Amino acid sequence: MRELKWKVLSTKYVYENKWLHIRADSCMLPDERIIDPYFVVETPSFCNMFIATKDERIVMVRQYRYPVDQITYELAGGVIEKDENPQMAALREMQEETGYSSHEIEYLFKAAANPALMNSTAYFFLAKNAVKIESTNFDALEDIDVVSFSKEEFIHLLHENKLQHGVQLGAVYESMIRLGWLHWK
């Protein structure tokens, strides 16, 4: 197989703040063509939890997303802090955003959020038999509603294209397979 990896000739950060760094790289392709600049967006890695209760209700968060001007239904989750274990971060985010907890956590997978543009990794988990144990503890700028859906309502939302957070859809389907709601033929 031919070599596909690029060689980085130089890197320059063009924007930096707490949540976002943008760098402009000069890169040489294997055939020696140069791409300059190739912009890379550096963001923190994050985690999401598919939350299923004992009575097969799916707990999600409902919030407004300014970049797409939509109110979305999403899996609970957020940024993984520096040196934090992804599963512990997912448990923390689940409790902070929904008040739910579970002792039955399964690792689903990790994925590049958008490998053409970003360097962050998304980690996905399934919480089974989750129970409400405490009130929510939102971050300062979070404006979230906690919602839950029966299995039938949730599948209807999915069929109606009401789940718009693209990077979460793989975890939604994987969770449904592991819960026995979907089967491969």
Image: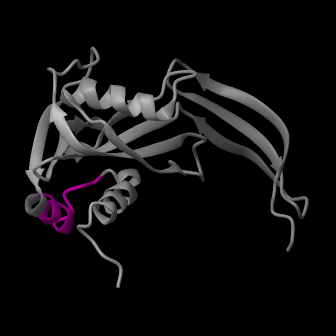
Whether residue 79 is visible to the viewer of this picture, yes or no, is no
Q: Say which quarter of the image contains residue 21.
A: top right
Q: Quadrant of residue 77?
A: top left
Q: Is residue 88 visible?
A: yes
x and y percent of residue 183 in the render? 30, 76
Q: Residue at x 47, y 28 (%)?
A: 80
On whether residue 161 falls in the magenta region, the answer is: yes
Answer left or right for 161 relative to 167: left
Of the 4 image quadrants, the one containing the N terminus is bottom right
Residue lying at 56% horizontally and 39% vertically, measured from the top left: 120
* Near-viewer residue (81 or 4): 81
> Is residue 43 rendered to the left or right of residue 159?
right
Q: How is colour applied across the structure in the image?
A: one colour
Which quarter of the rendered picture does the C terminus lie within?
A: bottom left
Relative to 174, say whether 47 is above or below. Answer: above
Q: Position of residue 84 (x, y in %)?
A: 52, 24
In the figure, 21 relative to 169: above or below? Answer: above
Residue 56 against residue 138 in the figure, above or below: below
Segment colored magenta:
154-164
Position of 147 with respect to 27 (left or right) is left
Q: Residue at x 14, y 53 (%)?
A: 56
